Image (cartoon, helix red, strand yellow):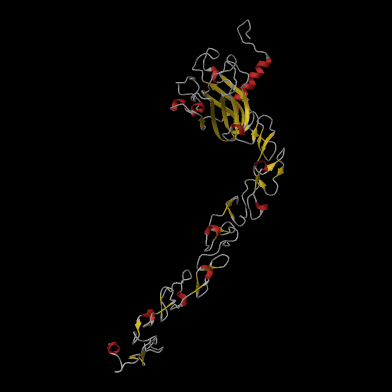
Amino acid sequence: MVSLSGDSVYPHDVLTVLFCLLTVSQAYVNVALNKPAYQQYSGSGDKYDASNAVDGHKSDLSGGGGQCAISDRRQTATWWVNLTTIHSIHHITIYFRTNNKPWGPSNWRTKYFLGFSVYVSNTTDRLQGTLCYKDDNFTLDTIPAVFTTTCPVHGQFVIYYNERLPGVTYPDYYSNYVHSGLCEVEVYGCPATGYFGSNCSVPCPDVNCQYCHIETGTCQGCKPGYKGHRCEITCERGTYGAGCKETCGHCRDVNQCSINNGTCLTGCNAAFKGDLCKTACDKGSYGYDCKETCGHCRDRYQCSNINGSCLTGCDPGYQGDLCKTSCDRGSYGSECNETCGHCRDVDHCSNINGTCLTGCDADYQGDLCKTHCPVGYFGQDCSETCINSYTCDGCNDVSGSCDYGCRPGWIGYFCQKRIGSEGGMSTTCQNRNMT
């Protein structure tokens, strides 16, 4: 409104609105500025990169100016900015790509933005968040080149989305495909949680409230460990986190599970490990905090992660429920059921396979020392030869004399005389004894 003198004259209500808008624009901070951004089907080159929409530059709204995020034309278009932490948001402003041309029906780019949506979410999944705005009213004549929507919620991701899906009927003035074409997205809110008001300086009124309405202070989310309309209720035993929706792990004492983050303050129950005690022991370990090592189980993966019992038995050489005890002296093998042979030192019989590690007793041979010396031999490792090894049936293991009789057809102390021979010892026997 202009007076006859040429001075501008504004009604009181208009001045009030302008003052409020000025106050809002000065109080809230653009928390999206220079934050990480992403867009689906991104156009080639930095000229169209998703980050262009949060770089603070909006003087050139053309495709070639390097200030806009522009994707390829497809059936869906998704762009988001990661605020890096959850923020209290007041309003969101979007500068669409106009190519610096008049906006409206004469600008062919207008139709690509009709039907768009804006979400705020704690993840990149828009459907897990809050729908701030869904366009189902704008036309080529009414859609603004600079769009603002108030959305007093909390979130980490602000998501722009549009679609032209097969089988869905859209107004005739909609495009057949969509793309992002966002030259700047500004997200205004408080830089820190736990505060509200026009200058983000008033603490949330409820002491355990983490997120409160940016305008009214009404609690919208409790600090981890609390719940209730005013966050006045502490999480019940065995629960923790935001809204007390998380379940404590296998804490040694569930009363010592932190209501804030679920940490088990006095450690884990047997078979579990980690701060939250939700991770089972690795194979081969067991017990409280998984600090014990499984014994010599036949299958190391069949060791109980609770008490270490070997569920399928022990490796050869070990015994007991935990398979940590070597076989008793003189035994070896699976379940220690085998008996060691005639080892020179029974303490050096391998508990695993029965091998005599320091050799055999006299008159025995082989790795297990369970085999008698062959006929005609005696002594340590069967290295001694009987005095008459060809005619003795068994010789003294000290003197080598034929103490155990002769082979058939021979007689005498040294089995040197063939039975039936007329001249005493045979020539063969004499020759052998003489040697």
Query: In the rendered picture of this protein, how many numbered marks are placed on residues?
Result: 0
Image coordinates of residue 159 in percent, x first then y, are 57, 29
Image coordinates of residue 48 in percent, x first then y, are 46, 25
Which residue sits furthest bottom?
423
357 versus 297 height, above or below: below
- Residue nearer the viewer, 80 or 411: 411
| Residue shown at 67% from the left, 52% from the top | 254
- Residue nearer the viewer, 406 or 21: 406
- Screen quadrant of the N terminus: top right
Does the image show residue 34?
Answer: no
6 versus 31 height, above or below: above
102 versus 199 height, above or below: above
Which residue sits furthest top?
4
Quadrant of res 344 = bottom left
377 versus 268 height, above or below: below
- Screen quadrant of the C terminus: bottom left
Quadrant of res 84 = top right
Image coordinates of residue 405 in percent, x first then y, are 40, 89
Does the image show residue 95?
Answer: yes
Quadrant of res 154 = top right
Left or right? Give the position of 23 relative to 49.
Answer: right
Image coordinates of residue 386 in percent, x first then y, are 35, 85
- Residue nearer the viewer, 425 or 126: 425
Left or right? Give the position of 314 relative to 394.
Answer: right
